[in-house]
Structure formats: structure tokens, C-alpha cells
Amino acid sequence: VAAIRRAEENARRMGLGSVVRVRARQLSDITKPTHQTMETGLLVVNPPWGERLSTTAAAEKLYSALGQVMHSEFSGWNAAVLAAQMSHAKATGLRSHKQYKMKSGPIDIALFLFALDEANKLRQTQEKPLDDGGVSQQDLPTLSTGGEMVANRLRKNLKKLSRWREQEKVTCFRIYDADMPEYAVAIDMYQGAIHMAEYAPPKTVNEVDANRRFDDVIDAVQVVFNVSSRGDIAVKRRKKQRGLDQYERVGRRNQRLLVNELGAKLWVNLFDYLDTGLFLDHRPLRERIQREVKGKRFLNLFCYTGVASVQAGVGGARYSTSVDLSNTYLEWFRDNLAINGLSESRHQIIRDDVLNWLASGTSEYDLILLDPPTFSNSKSTASDFDVQRDHVSLIRLTMARLAGDGVLYFSNNNRRFLLAAEITEEFDVEEITKSTLGPDFTRSTHIHKCWRIVRKVSGFTWPEAAH
């Protein structure tokens, strides 16, 4: 009631008291104005976005009810509806022909436009019985032709990976990786939870078509995995990242999930960052490190959330040192150590610029993982870092920290990266990329490149055979 009075007072102050009418109504009671005939008009709605509701499912039910009112009471009009998620707009059951992204404080929202004409049919789902997963089929979307194609591919991939997953006890893996180019999405499972990421389509692709295809994929995921609410799927609309953009928060759920990998427990966050805290493509490399590290000194450079160091600890490393510049991810790493009962006294965490740290010390290590970003910059460093430009000096500095018979694993995810000839001339280098990709990444052969680097054996010649 107080809000109604304030709105009326504001209208009077603007000289619109005789034009603007303010009423308190239930959503189900809203109709077209009756004081005169209005065949056309504009309905503007700012519902709760889910931030003010208890669950995403509650928000979607509200938007569904709004769609019913828009369709039944405002035929011939246009509508503009604010929403924080695409799933909310889709829950109206009506097709939005245009979206405008904007901010409401820290929250990303969008204004969805609807033409409420005869061509914009209200989508209805028929009542169906419960399936084996306990989710009512009426809560699941009806798939378009494209959505059905994606669903079939998901089922095929799951069947193909099932034996491997069971034998290796893999619970975090990639399900789909742009298998069909027009649906350019990566879909991962983290111990039953779904994470879905799409790179922004090229400018040549129509935005409406791209959004429709993206919706088709989400619908397919809901149907295949019996997910009734879109809000339970971690959805990221990706774009090319520069510098520290990849580390910025994109959400505020603070909802972590504990997963298992190779005998280690690991924290992931599927909603709040572009990345989840666990790079699934590096699983075979982490397994190799765990297998080789027993009794050795391990160094993890650009350590991120420290997963490789945790695996080294589980594998029996003598001790480890991990270096990164991000406070956020080093704290995450600390949580990963703690949940596995690993102490910081044995697994040292250092916040520093990797190049500076390498140049300022002399300690040696038997096994080193060097996995730099493609590009980075920071207020804490004087210059930026480019892996193609800087990898020669970086590898030389790292090799200076390698014990005589030690091994360096060098990896990066720059798809255009070329290893400089100086490195292959100075060191014994073997590319091992293929062996560091699991069965779930057979379609993603360019997701990273990896080399095994050791010192060249010099000063040794075979003795001549006796005559």
C-alpha cells in the first residue's frame, strides 16, 4: 500500500495525476484498461527476477502465470518484460523477438520484447506421468527438431562413455563439445550437476537464431537429465577473454560442490565464475603427475586452484610448492588442501608473479607443471604476459629450477601456439598432447597442447667396440 501511495504522489508531482492510474491487483486479475477500447498498447512488466524469490523454480512459475495473462488479456498489444535469466522469459511460453541486456546494480538483466499477435502462440505442455527420475514430464520442455537432435547426441555420447566412466570411476567429464557445429556449446557433468558454456557466436550469425539454438540445447539438457528448472543448470554465455577477465565473478550464489577425482576431493563452483575450479581436459596429465610424483619435490606454476598439487599430495609427493597471483584461487586451493587433510607446511602456497618468483630463487624440483594462461595482466605486475611471446624465457627460467634428472610438463591452451625452435634445440622435448586427452575430449584435440621437457644428455659417447 505504501508503494502505491508513493507512486501516486510521484505522478502528481510530474503533473500526470489525471493520466496515471495506480492500482494494487493480483496478477491473475490484470486485464486491459476498460475506460476505453484499446486494440493496441504496450504492457511493461518488472516482476521479481528470482533474486527476491526463494528459488528459480518459483520465479519461473510466476513468469509462466504472466505469460498466461499476456496471451489471454493483451492480444494485439506489445509487451516488454524485465528478467534476470533467459529461462524466465522462456517460462512465459511466448516467443520474444528482441532482447536488450542491461544492469540493475551488480545484477545482469535483460528487457525482453514480445509481439502478442496471433503468430505468437502460447506454448503448452501436456500432462504426462512421472518418469524414472521422479521429475514430472509436464515440468520438462517440449523439444524442437533441433533440440531433439541435440538430445539424441547427448544420449549417444553418454552411452559411448559409460564403460570408461565406470571402469575409471570418473564422475566429472565432458558430455558434448560442439559435436554439431551449429550448436557450439560445451556441456560438462560434475558429479551429477550440469555445466554448460557457449562461446559468443561470430558476428555473421543472426543473434535471434543463435539464442534459439542455445535455448534448444538447454531444453535438450533438461529432458535428457530430467532437470525441471533451468536455474539448476549452470549456464555461461562465453566470449573471448583477455587478461584477468576469466577470473571475474559472473554470479553470487556462493554455492560450492564437492567432487571426487583420482582419489582426491575437490571443491568446484559451477555458477559464480567463467571457469569452475577444475579443468576437466587436464585430468590425464594430473593422473600422470600423481603416478610419477611419489617421494619427489613438486612445483606447480600458475597453479590456479591447486588441483595438480592436491593430486601430487595424494600421490605421495615429498613436498610441493605452488605459485599463483590470484588471492581468490589460492584461498580456493587452501580449501582443497584442507578437505584432503594435506598441510600447508608440506604443500607451500606462494602468492607471487611466476616470472619474478622463478628469477629470484634457486630451489630445485624433481617434477614441475608449467601451465600458463594464454594472456594475463595484473595491477600487481609491471608488464603483461603473452605465452607465445614470452614462453622461451619462461621455460628457460623454469628449467633452471629443475633437478638434473627432473621432468617439466609444459602445457597451454592457446590453439595457435607454436613452440619456439630454441626450446627444442636447448632441451630434449617430446610433445605428449594426445596422451593427455581423455576419451571425453577426443573431439577437442586443440583444447590444449602439452610437452614433456628434460635436459639433454651431453658429454657421453658410446665406447668403440673391441676389435
Image (tube, helix red, strand yellow):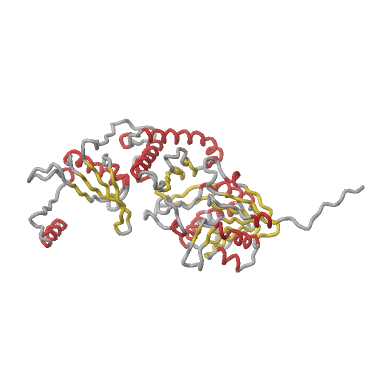
Q: Position of residue 414 (x, y in %)?
A: 53, 52
Asked whether 406 or 179 is in front, the reply is 179
- Image: 263 above or below 242: above
Residue 458 left/right relative to 130: right
Q: Position of residue 243 (x, y in %)?
A: 47, 59
Q: Position of residue 59 (x, y in %)?
A: 28, 46
The quarter in which the N terminus is drawn is: bottom left
Observer able to see residue 338: no
Quarter residue 458 falls in: bottom right
Q: Position of residue 72 (x, y in %)?
A: 18, 38
Residue at the extreme front: 204
Observer able to see residue 224: yes
- Image: 351 above or below 433: below
Residue 141 left/right relative to 195: left
Asked whether 337 or 95 is in front, the reply is 95
Q: Residue at x 49, y 60 (%)?
A: 376
